[in-house]
Amino acid sequence: MLRRLRIESFVLIREADLAFGPGLNAVTGETGAGKTILAQAIGLLLGAPGDASYLGPGADEAYVEAELDLPEGVLDEPGLEAIAELRPPGEEGLVAARRVFADGRTRAYAWGRAVPREEVAALVERLLAMSGQFEQRRLARPSHQLDVLDAFVGEEQLGRRAALARTWRELLVARRRRDELAAAAAGRAERLRELEELVERTEGMEPGAEERLLAERERLRHVGELAGAAATAAEALAPEEPDVAGAAERLAVAVRELEGVAGLAPELQEVAGELDEAGIRAREGASTLRAFLASLEAEPGRLEALEGELDRIAEARRRFGAATTDDLLARAAAARTELEQVAAGVDPSEAAERAVTAAERDVAQLCATLSAARSQAAAPFAEAVAGELQSLGMGDGEFRVELSAREAGPTGTDAAVFLVRPNPGLPFAAAAETASGGELSRLALALRAVAHAAGGEPTVVFDEIDAGIGGRTAHAVAEALARLAESAQILTITHLPQIASAAGAHFRVEKVPGDPTHTRIERLSERERKDELERMLGGAEFLSTVRP
């Protein structure tokens, strides 16, 4: 659902902050008031190119921003991986925006972060569909036509599609694994020798060993400095020479002197206790330092052994192209597994081929089931769409679905093309190439009305849907929009009171004179709405001439 649309300095719109409601939203206004500008602003979010003419008078830039609900699972769809990573934690919706600069350049944003225009458009198009030129672009894609037909078939068909997409990915992985093993088959003996060498060279290595060894080597390289500092400190605290007084002995003297007079000045007792504790710590520190000195002298050949082990690890990493010791050990573990399989008589190539065969079988079964359902649904779907087109004023409403076979893919082995004949006597032609702007909008409405739930789009914007119609056809369009609005959010830009009167939320676009003139868009109260509908019907004077 499109919750909010913000527009700043866009053509004649200085500023607009529009909160749309669920169901049917209508936008009306006098011809030339700026309804087309609103459609252009929404078109920017769907990937339309920028233009310097979009900047309002005296503005340095134009800005359009939309807040949309983000249904669960949308960001998991193919092609949206990069933009999905930008979603802030805890953010449930999408904030998408486009900025147009004075030279016509634009910048696109998702959640306030700059991203390629195409990525923002691809995501917004999953959430919002717009008739007119954008509908023509969608209908030109065979994949969209297949999506609409499958939506008509129902939830079970959509479930099969999801299962096929998963199985297709598994098949691609299995084929890649098989091909990798086949490419390595020629050098199998050499590969086995390499695996054995990898296992042998990493024998006894542990994760993180290199880091620990480097730290220990650094310590041993400075053993002289460490020993000198420890010996000096130990002597200062508690010398081994009996005739030399260290810090511990001096503290003991201080304690004895203070204890001798503590009876005369009790406050000295606390100082004596603190000095006594310091003396104990000084003796303990000296003992710890001498133990440290002993440990340094215990392994005189340890540094040489460390250098040898580090050289072994570094050479193994270079030999097998591992960035880290952990990477090297991971490869060694995989090598052990493969060697164990070879020893057990398991051929990895045969196992990979079996995996490919199983995945291909599953893909074929799902493709066949999808195709059968599409073939069975094509005729009733076309008949239902034709009926809708007739009621929407598109001639005899002649409509066909042409299915053809294609190479298997994640959506099956079918290609669908929608064919229409807007006028009797003309041949059938592809819908995207034949219908005019208004006809495309009505075709889009018919398709969504038949395919249920707006063909999967939460929000649909209809522009020019009332081009060239009136009377009963206008009422039919209004009824179809109202039905569709029960399962999707609809935004329609219209001149017809029949359509506007069916809306739950009504917005008026009007041009405000001034220097410069600007366009204002506002949501109407119930009283204001009645006035606007009266204006659309011809005004009070006209209505007085037709009322009894």
Image (cartoon, grey):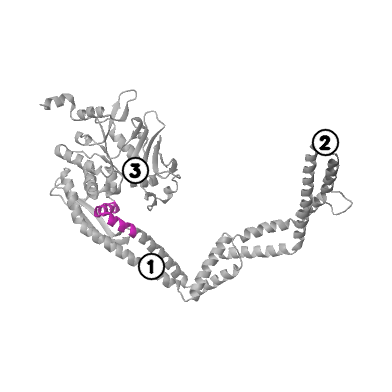
The stretch drawn in magenta includes residue 162: yes
The stretch drawn in magenta includes residue 281: no
Q: CA distance from mark 1 to mark 2?
A: 93 Å
Q: Which residue is mark 2?
A: 265
Q: Identify the mark nearer the N-term, 3 or 1.
A: 3
Secondary structure state at the residue bearing disc 3 = loop
* 159 with respect to 205 (left or right): left
- Magenta stretch in the rendered image: 141-163
Q: Identify the mark nearer the N-term, 3 or 2.
A: 3
Residue for point 67% across, 65% down: 308
Q: Which residue is mark 1?
A: 356
**Marks 3 and 1 close (CB-CB < 8 Å):** no
Identify the residue at the far front of this view. 263
Q: Nearer the viewer, residue 365 or 465?
A: 365
Give percent across and percent down for residue 48.
Answer: 34, 42
**Amino acid residing under circle 2:** Ala
Q: CA distance from mark 3 to mark 1?
A: 39 Å
**Amino acid residing under circle 1:** Val
Identify the residue at the far left of this view. 548
